[in-house]
Image (cartoon, rainbow, N blue to C red):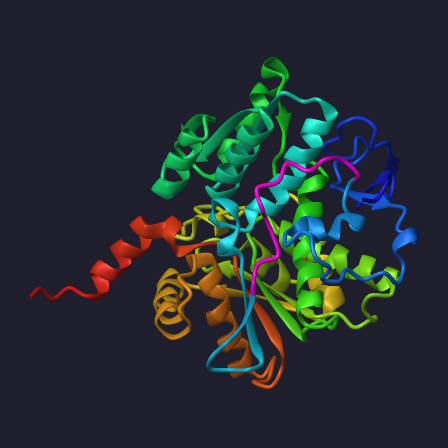
């Protein structure tokens, strides 16, 4: 595994020690990147020898050198579409706790355990809460979860079964975050909010390594990523930079496409108005709980990546998402989360607009299992099929 050299602020470039737990840059509040000494791994791509982990820890050379708290997360399949050979679906619903959040929380909890932390707190729209609860249980660490009262039932039940201390909040994830921050000093818990600690990005960046390996060490023309907090999009961009340094891929980068709900689209609005940061989205409303993030903490990083990659940001309505859930299920055999199915709609929109062509090789992220959204999908299906036998 890699030795951490330091933590780097993504705003001012300040270097902080990784010997103690860190949250954000004390100078300007910037999110922190983990920087390693990667020289020993230059030119040494992972292979498939017997015994190598079929999990995200197969990339241990670019992850922290500590014993992992693992539940088998990562190395999810990259499935070629049965209807368009240039489209690949990265199915993150097959992770522990049924979503891509397992990767980031695995890395974060692993480091919290290594630091000797005993109480963790998180505001979550649902899936991050489930992942923290599971990994905290495996690590023997206390988890405090703050979730909107209308999260999918599966998330609430999961957290309770894993033994987490759950607080349901009347409001959005931003209201949950305020509660975590207000009680942090008295409760003395460590906040593992999105991009307010450096290691969730490290877990999520493994999605970028996997895509490259699964495409025989090439990168696609575009990646469609459902974007709430945007950790995965940021993590993959970091992975591409690391892989180029290591000589594992060339300098070509995919166009990064941020996909958001029409009822909560702060990144799309900032992108279309050419802003460097997003403004708070008042009255956020969408059935896709993971996309109901009124203002991502690291919006400046997301928007910068869209610019650097020649990408864009796209909105999808709730009805479009839920219709795409049904379509993917019936045509691909993949029961996707609404957030993930939004990628299918966004891809069609960008091909229709001429931004992409049907021959461009693209990866669409399904960020979670549709089984986590049975209550949401079932209500939509009931509205679509009003007839009775």
Nearer to us in this view, 389 or 217: 217
Q: Position of residue 222 (x, y in %)?
A: 64, 72
Q: Where does the N terminus fall, quadrant-wise? A: top right
- Residue closest to the far top: 186
> Which image quadrant: the C terminus?
bottom left
Q: Is residue 295 visible?
A: no
Identify whether 67 is placed above or below 116.
below
Q: Residue at x 37, y 52 (%)?
A: 371
Residue 182, located in which quarter of the rendered image?
A: top right
In the rendered structure, which segment of residues is drawn in magenta?
Answer: 65-77
Q: Residue at x 68, y 28 (%)?
A: 113
Q: Which residue in the rendered view is the most extreme toward the front?
A: 50
Q: Would residue 63 be found to the left or right of residue 37 on screen?
A: left
Residue 256 vs residue 220, the one in the foreground: 220
Check residue 304 for magenta coloring. Answer: no
Residue at figure coordinates x 56%, y 35% from the top left: 135
In the rendered image, residue 17, in percent from the top left (x then y), is placed at 86, 31
Indicate left or right for 326 with 76 as reference: left
| Relative height, residue 221 to residue 183 (above, below) | below
Q: Is residue 37 above or below residue 67?
A: below
Q: Is residue 163 left or right of residue 258?
A: left
Residue 143 relative to residue 21: left or right:
left
Rendered location of residue 152, percent (x, y): 37, 44
Dominant SS in magenta: loop
Give the residue displayed 80% in from the left and 26% down from the top: 20
């Amino acid at each position: 595994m890699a030795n951490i050299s330091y933590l780097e602020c993504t705003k001012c470039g300040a270097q902080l020690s990784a010997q103690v737990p860190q949250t954000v840059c004390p100078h300007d509040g910037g999110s922190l990147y983990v920087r390693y000494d990667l020289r020993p791994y230059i030119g040494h791509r992972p292979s498939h020898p017997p015994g190598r982990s079929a999990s995200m820890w197969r990339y241990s050379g670019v992850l922290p050198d500590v014993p992992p708290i693992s539940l088998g997360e990562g190395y999810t399949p990259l499935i070629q579409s049965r209807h368009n050979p240039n489209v690949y679906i990265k199915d993150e619903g097959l992770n522990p706790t049924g979503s891509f959040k397992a990767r980031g929380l695995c890395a974060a909890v692993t480091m919290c355990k290594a630091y000797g932390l005993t109480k963790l707190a998180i505001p979550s729209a649902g899936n991050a809460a489930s992942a923290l609860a599971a990994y905290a249980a495996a690590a023997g660490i206390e988890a405090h979860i703050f979730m909107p009262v209308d999260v999918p039932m599966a998330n609430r039940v999961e957290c309770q079964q894993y033994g987490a201390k759950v607080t349901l909040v009347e409001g959005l994830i931003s209201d949950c975050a305020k509660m975590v921050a207000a009680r942090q000093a008295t409760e003395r818990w460590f906040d593992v909010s999105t991009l307010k600690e450096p290691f969730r990005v490290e877990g999520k960046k493994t999605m970028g390594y996997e895509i490259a390996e699964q495409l025989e060490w090439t990168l696609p023309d575009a990646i469609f990523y459902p974007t709430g907090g945007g950790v995965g999009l940021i993590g993959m961009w970091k992975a591409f930079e690391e892989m180029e340094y290591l000589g594992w891929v060339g300098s070509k980068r995919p166009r990064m496409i941020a996909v958001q709900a029409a009822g909560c689209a702060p990144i799309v609005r900032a992108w279309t108005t050419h802003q460097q940061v997003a403004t708070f989205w008042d009255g956020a409303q969408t059935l896709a709980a993971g996309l109901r993030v009124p203002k991502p903490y690291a919006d400046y990083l997301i928007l910068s990546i869209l610019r650097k990659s020649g990408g864009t940001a796209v909105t999808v309505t709730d009805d479009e998402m839920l219709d795409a859930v049904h379509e993917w299920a019936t045509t691909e055999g993949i029961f996707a989360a609404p957030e993930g199915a939004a990628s299918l709609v966004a891809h069609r929109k960008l091909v229709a607009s001429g931004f992409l062509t049907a021959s461009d090789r693209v990866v669409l992220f399904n960020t979670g299992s549709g089984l986590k959204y049975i209550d949401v999908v079932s209500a939509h299906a009931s509205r679509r099929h009003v007839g009775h036998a």
